[in-house]
Amino acid sequence: MIRFAAIVIVLIFAVIGYWFADPARAKNVAGVFDNLINQTADIEQDVFEFQALEAINERRQQLNLAALSTAPEIQDALARFGASQRNLADTRLKDLFANLQSEFPGAQYLSATVLLDPRDDGLFKSIAKWEDAGNPQYATLSTLAFRDGLRKGCIAVLARQLPPFDLEAANREGGRFFQRCPHCGSAHAVMLDRKSQTLILACPDCQKPYDVLAADTHEQFRRATDFLEGFRLPGIASTPTPNEDSMLAIWSAVLRHCRYEYDNTSMKRGEAWKKPSETWKDAAGDCEDTSILLADALASAGIESRVAVGWNIHIGQHAWCVAKIGNQQWVLESTLQLKADQTPELRTVADAAEEYQPEQLFDRQHLYFRNDGKERAGCDDYWADSRWETMSVDR
């Protein structure tokens, strides 16, 4: 018995000698004992985040990749998610992704992992060796450290987020953005197609349009509402109370001053919208240009007006102007050619409903989209809430 005890003691000392003979092994053993002693101690999250980022960026530097940065908003979301879980070591990544994607619809790329190790340096090595850590598509790292018995663990999240859609940035830098649908609230990616000169932005989920963009003469996209600049026709006296005579005078002035001209006649690009001041200066424009000019001039004279974009059964795709005084609405065609002594004939919206089939409307402050479920159909009321959904535009 004494001999057996002696053998056990010798073996124990041999193991201890083996482990502590090498500094690296001694450090590992010290880490295990440290976890045994301090397994209830709080983890300094800020320190852990810094060390994890340092470890992963050291590897990325070796791979000639850009360094990752922190994402405080994702870090906070990760902490909230962790507080809702019973056992972080058993975290289901599917649930984590669903949670993060609901909070950050602009997350173009997401990757996550759960790592466990009894030693701090082992945990950081695992993070650095994580395969996705060497992927150039990611830009940020967020981590949540926790204890799991004698082990330390962490949830690590790599991400690249799309910026929210900004028209100025899209014109300047291009690229992809995310946009949240004002109708159903879902988020989706948006990228301006430079080959298209007029863009109707619509939600891929609910299929409803929510914005109209067009290229101007400087090859910059603008919202349709921004083309109405508050232009007032020179030589047209304002009247205290707008009436049909003042509307006819403005309409006639635009028709006499502006000749119809296709965009590609005067511009290198195939299609561009002009601002009213440009159309008036050029004394020429296509249907969008002259309709925008006419609607803006009428609005400056106090007459309710909108630009309509849609179809004409004789022309095809078309734009025109509609105006309203009191309870009466008129279609004002801006591409008519008048003789010297000729006055255009007023035509009510109801009379022109079969020929003119509007899809979108806009004025200085709002966009209007059909909500009556009809396509390629006439309309006898361009101001009815039952037919048009109003979208406000931040200017």
Image: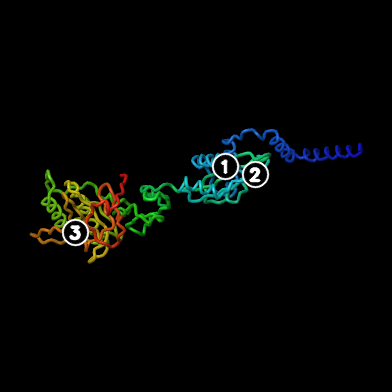
Q: Please, what secondary structure does the residue beneath circle 3 have?
A: helix
Residue denoted by label 3: 350
Dot 3 surroundings within 10 Å: few (below 14), some, or many (20 or more)? some
Q: Earlier in the sequence, mark 2 or mark 3?
A: 2
Question: Image quadrant for the C terminus?
Answer: top left
Indicate whether 292 appears above or below 142.
below
Q: Give the alpha-carbon distance from disc 2 to disc 1, as whole Å.
A: 17 Å
- Contact check, label 3 and label 1, Cβ < 8 Å: no
Residue 229 visible in the current orientation: yes
**Residue 281 appears in the rendering:** no
Residue depth check, mark 2 versus mark 3: number of the one nearer the observer: 3
The residue where tag 2 is placed is 116
Residue 291 occupies quadrant = bottom left
Where residue 230 sits: x, y (%)?
A: 22, 46
Q: Taking 18 as reference, is 369 above or below it?
A: below
- Give the residue type that dot 2 points to: Leu
**SS at circle 2:** strand
Asked which secondary structure carries label 1, the reply is: loop
Mark 1 residue type: Gln
Quadrant in which the N terminus is drawn? top right
40 or 167, nearer to the observer: 40
Q: Nearer the viewer, residue 76 or 135?
A: 76
Q: Which mark is residue 85?
A: 1
Q: Position of residue 376 (x, y in %)?
A: 28, 62
Q: Residue drawn at (12%, 54%), measured in percent from left and top?
A: 248
- Please report whichever mark, 3 or 1, sits nearer to the chain's N-terminal start: 1
Using residue 45 as the reference point, say whether residue 184 is left or right of it: left
Gap between marks 2 and 3 measured at Cα: 72 Å
Q: CA distance from mark 3 to mark 1?
A: 62 Å
**Which quadrant of the figure has residue 11?**
top right
Locate residue 299, reporting x and y percent. 19, 48
Q: Position of residue 277 (x, y in %)?
A: 21, 50
